[in-house]
Structures are given as structure tokens and as C-alpha cells.
Amino acid sequence: MKKKIWAVLLGLSMALGLTGVSAVAAEDPVHIRVALFTDGADMTDSQKQVFDAFKEEYPEIEPEFEYITSDSYGSNWNGYLMKIQTMIASGNEPDVAALGLEGVAFLAMNGLGLPIDDYIAAHPEEMEAISYDALSTDLVDIFRVDGKLYGVPYEANSVVTHIRKDIFEEAGIALPADDWTWDDFKDICAQIKASGVDAYAFGVPQNFFCLQALLYSEGGAPLNDDWTEAAINSEACNKVFSFLHDSIWVDEYAPQPSDTISDVELIVQGKTAMGWWGRWVSDDYNSSELYDTIYVTNVPGGAAGNTTCAGSAGFVVLNTTEHPEEATKVALWAAGPTYSQVFLKTGSLPANPTWGEEICATDGIIDNYQIMYDVYNNGTWRRSQDPPEYADLANVYAKYMDIIYADQEPVAQALDEAAAEINQIFEESSYRTTEEDLAVIDGLFKN
Amino acid sequence: MNTKTISARQRKIRDNVTGYLFMAPTVFFYTVFTGIPLLMTVFVLSFSDFSLLKPITFIGLKNFRSLFTDPDFRTVMLNTLKFVSIIAPVHIIGGLVLALAVNGVKNRRLQGVYRILFYFPLVVTTSAIVIVWGYLYDKDFGVFNWMITTLGGKRVNWLGDSRWALLSIAIFSAWKFIGNAFLYYYIGLQNIPETQIEAARIDGANRWQCLFRIQIPLLTPTIFFVVVTTLINCFQIFDETYFLTKGGPGVSSQTIAMHIYRKGFQEYHFGYASTLGLILFIIVLIVTIIMFAGQNKWVNYDME
């Protein structure tokens, strides 16, 4: 009898145990690893807020943010993407990764991304929740490769001129109009120099993304229109680089850039009065408590008017993920309002103006942020030219910016050498060997 | 007799097994983290196209041909040779001079202070201390130029001019790493029996004679070690250039090790980076072989 009782109890406990296990398994949330690019700032609180908000909507999914830093040589996204690559190669890849426009073609042409078109078609309610229709179509198309969409932008940055109001005031100079020109800019530089204020007029761009804005305004570009050949040695580019070179070595409007003090640190420390960036530097302004000090306006107008450089970043689902449905849900949700309200309070410009303008209006850093959105509304922007060989190009750009800024070679010679190296990269590229590949590059969004 | 022989043999085997067991962890880690990567680099990756994400493709000698079309290869090789020819003598000779000077200090406590002073920079992380040096060197806002202009001189473009960048890095490198050579020499000098120097003094040898006839000859094994390791380290120089100038202006201070990093970890050309690594390996190997082949002529291992 005792044996029977024991057998029944054992059977019951096993049955309960199994039921328990299956119940736990059913409730166990799916963990989605999300890689984020960071400059090293502590985001613990922000992360918790976003976690809580997401889990409230989707308790069955547990996002895990992984912050990845990068060195800044060439492009900030380079080192970040390299680390993602290493994670993929070692089988330790995230499910979702934030990606700037630089790496979109590279990622897609290496077959690393998962297209999200089918998911979007099947979940219109999620697209409505993130106000997808309010996004600039061009900003979205940056994430379209070979007709397939790989991400929805959550941030977008247009390069504008940042001006320290206090230095202008000290020098007795009026803030420029939004439609100012390069001649106006040069006049202001001369006035700042003559005023005797203890600051240079501006800092030359150290980031090629920002420098492209100046090239675009003069009608130049590093590559030709279909991204098959270098155009960095064009007359327009030469004019811009010569101006930047002369500003350092002839007119003394700008200091020679160094690795010790970046162009952003120069304006934060009040050592320069102007510079060119997107909204992302508001993080630096905020951490230095630089409130009500910065005014922004368009890049000075040249041969192509006030056209600037802009781009977007979005979350891309890696095709190695074991949970494509959940990963896509996280990636799209991050393009929504909660993520922007928490992570982009200061920092990059939210891609979606629906809530972006509200966020910018309350940051207390850049009052006239509207000019950054006007760039998209007016169509006075061009995307940065990022073919799949962007990492090689970033090193060429960094090398020759350095050579020109350091007065190591005549500008024309340096630009001719840069063009030759770019063309060599294209000739030897493994991304341009078949007609299909060339068609994919040809089909990338360009404006 | 037979039993005794077997017993000795068994003891020998047992000793060998114990020795191999002690070596096993090192051999294992060396094989996994150095041996296999080295063989992969030499025999596989150098002849392949590899970007981490796609399967390795054999491309024969293409990477070696690329050495001739790489616009920066010649410059970075020359830069590396310049660094070796500037920094190696500074470390090798400077370290020896410092060690002899400190060894000559009679006060033991003061000797300890000097030891700490000269070795301290080596303990500090390069990436951290280089931030300070960057501010010292800065052209517009740096301390060195502030001092120079205060004294009526002209600003020097320490890191932003290719004519100064190599020298600036060499100065930093000397400050940062000379303590390593100094320490080896110092220990070597401490190991020279005092009795030999005293005997020479009694026989009438002056200070210089003691130095050149006793101390330096007895120090030659240490000098040999320092020369070999310093040359190898100088050929592989990376930290100083990467952190101080990022190889600039342009590539004017970029070394072969930094070029390998750039090609591999920034541009994803791991095959070509491996070829560059192989070239560096061969150069270091040749230099080391030459050093070892020539040591019989000047290194004195006889302490008696």
C-alpha cells in the first residue's frame, strides 16, 4: 500500500513538475540583444526607462541593450560596426543593431541584414504607432538596398552652423541670417579676429560627414553622382579645402585641429566661435552645462545655395537572429516616441518630427533647433556618399584632411592623390565585380 | 645492476612527465593563442581574401602584389625604420647611462627613489598618460609651446607637422619606456660581484677602466637581451603613434604595426593585413637571427 502511495505521489510530483516547467517556459520572455553605439556616457537610467516602457507593451520580450564604443578615426561608426562584425564572426552577434547610414550598403551587401518589408506589411498597427507616415521618405529610403527595406530611422542629423552667442556678443557681431553666404562667413571671421576676443573664428571640421556639408554647399562632393568615381579633386572641392587650409595657415581664423582637443571641445571651451555639426553635439553642450549659449543656422551658402549634408540612423535586424519576429518588433518600436523621448532628450535629432520637435523644444540647449528640420522640409540636403567601401574611403578622407590641415602638401596635389586612392579602392573592390553588385550600388538612394 | 638501470630510467621518465605537465598549460595557451594564429597568418590568411564575414578565399600572391600598389606601404616601412633608428639607441644607450648613474649612487634610499622615478612611467597606461602629453604638445594650447613663447621662442608644431611628429613621439617614447631597459641594466649591474671591482681598484684601475674593462663586459649578456627585445619592440611600435598622432599628419608617423591595424580592423582586409604581419615577422626574425649570430663576438657569458 505504502509503495502505491509513494508511486502515486511520485507520479503527481513529476506531473506537477513538468507542468511547472512548461508554465515557466511559456512565460519566459524572449531575450533580444540590441547593440547601440555610445560615446561612453552612462545610460543606465535611460535604459531602465526604455526597458520598462517596452515591457509594459510587450511583456513577452526582454530587450537587452549592449553599449558599444568606438574610436573616432575616420568615422565614429567605423569602429562600432567593426565590433559588430567581430561579434558576428565569433557567433556572439546581437539580434538588433543601431546603424548609421554609412554602414547600410555594407551591411546589406554582405547579407547581414534582415529585410523588414514583409513584417511591415503584416503589422500596419505598429507602423501607425511609430507615425511611420510622418517620416521623410528620403530618410527612410537610405535604408533601402536592392529594393528591400532594412530599417526605419529613429534619428537624423543635418549639419548646421553652430555659433557661440556669447563670443559674437563680446565681439559686437550680429547673428547671421539663415540665408547667409560664404562671403558673409568670411566677413564675420575677419570681424572676430579684429575684435580681439580670445577665440578663433571657427574650428575646421574633423569629421568628414560635417565637411561634406561644406563641399555640398559649394556644389562639390567626394564622389561623382553615381558613386563610381572620385570627384574630390573637383574645382568646387578644391575651393572649400583651400579655404579651410588658408583659414589655418594664412588668415588664422581657425586653429590646426589636433587629436588632443577636438573641434567640438574647442567650441565647448569657448576657444572657437563657430563650427559645423548636427544636433548630436548637444550632448557635449549639456554635459558642460552650456545652456542658452548656442545658436544654429544653415551652412553658409555657396554655388549650391545652403545645401548641407544629412543622414539617418536606424535599428537593423541581423539575419542571424533566432527570433526575427521579436527582434523586428524591438527594432521598429525603437523608432517610436518613447525611445526618442528617453535617449534623444539631448543628442541626435529625432528622425520623426511628430515628437522630435517637442523633444528639441524642451532640451534647453539649442533654442532655434527648427532650422535642423527645415533642411529636410526644404530639401536643402544631400545624404553623405557611403558606398559599401565606406570604411576604406573614411580612412582616405581622414588621411588627406589631415595632410591639408597640417599644410603637408599643396591642396590640389593632396586632392589629386586622394582621388587616385579612391579610384584604386573602387577598382580593387570586391563589391563591384558583378553586374548585380553594380546594379545594387546604382540603386542606392542618392540625392 | 639491471634493477638499478631500470629504476634510473623510470625516474628519468617520471621527471620528464612532471616537467611536461608543468609546461602543459603554457604550451596549450601558446599553441592556441600564438602558434595556431601564427601558422594561420603565414600559410593561410596571407594568401587569402578574408573580411571576417565571408568564407576565406584563396587568392594566391595577390596580397603580396598589393604591397607594391599600396600607396602607404613604402611610407610606413620607412617610418618604422626611422623609429627604430631613433628610439632603439635612445632606449639602449639612455637606459644604460641611467642604470650606471643610479648604480653609482651610494645612498641606498636615494637609489630607490631614482629607481621608482625612472620606472614609474612604465607602470602608467599609455592611453591614459598620452592624454596629458597631448596637452603638453598641443600647438595652440599646449604647455611646451606656452613655455617656448614665454621665453620669446616660436611655437613648435609638435604633433601636427611631419618634421616634428617623429621626434615628438620619440621623446615621449623615451620618457615612457626607457625605464624598462634601465631596470634590466640596473639588475645586471647589481649582479656583478663587487669583489671584482674592488680587486681592480686595488690593482690601480680607475673608475673608467672599471667601467669599460669589468662592468660593461660582464653586462654584455644583459645588453644583448635589451638590444634584442628593444629592437623587436621598436619594430612593433604602435601605442605611441596611435594615441599621439593617429599616424598623422597623413601617414607621416604611421608605422607598420599601425598600418596592419588599420587595414585589418578599420578596413576589414584581414588577408592583406596578415601579409603585412608576415612581412613584419620576417623582418623581426632576420634582425633577431643576425643579433644571435653575432653575439659570440661581443657577448661575454663568462662571469669567472
Image (cartoon, rainbow, N blue to C red):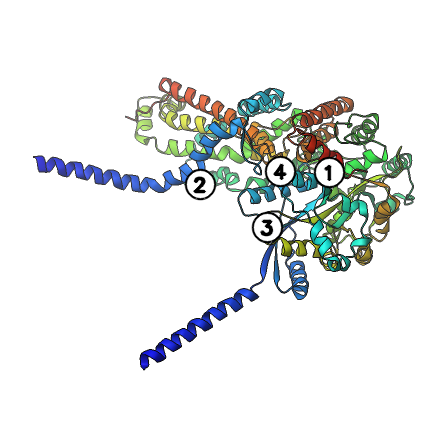
Residue at label 3? Answer: A321
Residue at label 4? Answer: B133
Residue A430 placement (x, y as % from top left): 64, 30
Three-letter code, disc 3 = Thr
Q: Nearer the viewer, residue B203 or A377?
A: A377
Image mark 2: chain = B
Tell me the distance, in whole angstroms, between the alpha carbons under discs 1 and 4: 23 Å
Q: Nearer the viewer, mark 2 or mark 3?
A: 3
Residue B95 seen in this snapshot:
yes
Residue B129 placement (x, y as % from top left): 58, 41
Q: Residue placed at 17% from the left, 39% from the top?
A: B10
Does the CB distance between marks 2 and 3 fall below 8 Å? no
Q: Residue furthest left?
A: B1
Image mark 1: chain = A
Residue at label 2? Answer: B112
Q: Residue furthest bottom?
A: A1
Q: Earlier in the sequence, mark 1 or mark 3?
A: 1
Residue A165 seen in this snapshot:
no
A438 sits left or right of B46 in the view:
right
- Quadrant position of the C terminus of chain A in the picture: top right
Residue at label 1? Answer: A207
